[in-house]
Amino acid sequence: MNAEKPLKVGVVGAGFIGPAHVEALRRLGIHVLGLCECGSERARQKAAEMRLEKAYPDFEDMLADPELDVIHITSPNYLHAPQAKAVLQAGKHVVCEKPLAMNSTESAELVQIAKASGKVAAVNFNIRFYPLALQARAMVQSGEIGEVFIVQGSYLQDWLLLPTDWNWRLEPELGGEMRAVADIGSHWLDLLTFITGEEVEAVLADFKTFLPVRRKPTTQIDTFGGKLQTAAEYVEQPIHTEDYASILLRFSSGARGVLTVSQVSAGRKNRLFYEIDGSRAALSWDSERPNELWIGHRERPNELLMKDPSLLVPQARQYTSYPGGHNEGFPDTFKQLYKAVYDYIAQGDLTAKADFATFEDGHKELVLGEAILRSSKEGRWVDVKG
């Protein structure tokens, strides 16, 4: 980064993910100047908690600050597209949480705006940056496991298991028509297409809402906060988004896949699991044991690769900060993603291939998500049209 003028960053939103962005940026020595939140008092409170210099009363005030070079968007889903568009048109770099937009029409427009802006436009698919995810990608794409036959796995959580559990993501006007698939399934789909280099060609999806009515608290509760507190006052709220989904996947290479997504699986706090079965070997990984990569063989004993930079390929080693036996987990993925983003900004060549998810990747996920949603409604295979 430019030593004469270090970049200054603003963060939109201070719920669950906003502070994760702030923490990761600070670990890299990047100057987080301030944040904006819903309401000036809440903004001041959150800024004080994180010891930030500025608390912007609204997004427009943040956008108008000439000191800011980059803005990270961690607001509710319905705000992503208009805010990302405004950031780029204001001449600032942007890192946006997923989903990039509420639909693929909005995201397609953002891709074009990003291309014309001359600014970096990244999507926060941080799960790519577990060291062993990068190791798995190198192994698959080098042909080490042979031809990919099957891609299978799940993303399971329990934070919305009870009727009293609530979050803004349950409201379609704020989060979109899909919930579990858009919120966590999108991470799994992005990760596995990133690792394998495969494109999903068609999908067959089955959705289920197990809790058709929930108790919406009359006071605000942060994401995951409902597990620590139960609102005394609430209203009955019909639910129209999925608690669960299973999705069959056909890849353009001929490989097949299946994904199960749930936010009502007791005991599963945040478990992303995958297995990639190839013609020579298989790979398996569990986010609750993120420093272990299982390597399966037929003709010799299976292996368990522990995360150790001395044992990893260079592509994975460069995003590994600690030696073997020193675990790296969820917060580290944010740090490594932002390392890639801010190094790319510093290099100044937007024609170079990015090491992180861009707005084009975010758009692809929305196109895929819309095919999944259509399939669930129509009960048939749907082609993914990009």
Image (cartoon, rainbow, N blue to C red):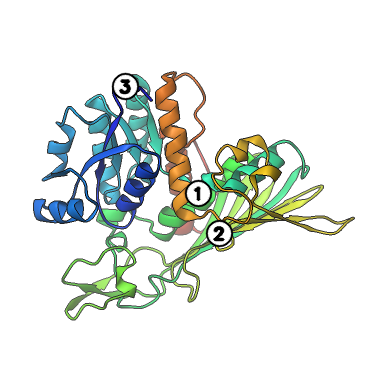
- Give the residue at x 90% y 55%: 299
**Residue density around tag 2, few if under 14, some if 14–19, many if 20 or more, within 10 Å:** some
Q: In this view, does 147 lie to the left or right of 381?
A: right
Amino acid type assigned to the residue bearing label 3 in the image: Ser
The CA distance from mark 1 to mark 2 is 9 Å
Which residue is disc 3 drawn over?
117
Q: Where is residue 269 in the image (x, y as percent from the top left)?
A: 47, 68
Residue 12 visible: yes
Which residue is disc 1 drawn over?
127
Q: Position of residue 363 (x, y in %)?
A: 42, 37
Q: Do the residues labelled 1 and 2 touch (CB within 8 Å)?
A: yes
- Give the residue at x 41% y 53%: 182
- Give the residue at x 24% y 26%: 89
Instruction: Residue lying at the far right in this picture: please name it.
Output: 299
Residue 371 visible: no
Identify the element where label 1 is drawn: helix
In the displayed structure, 291 sits above or below 265; it is above
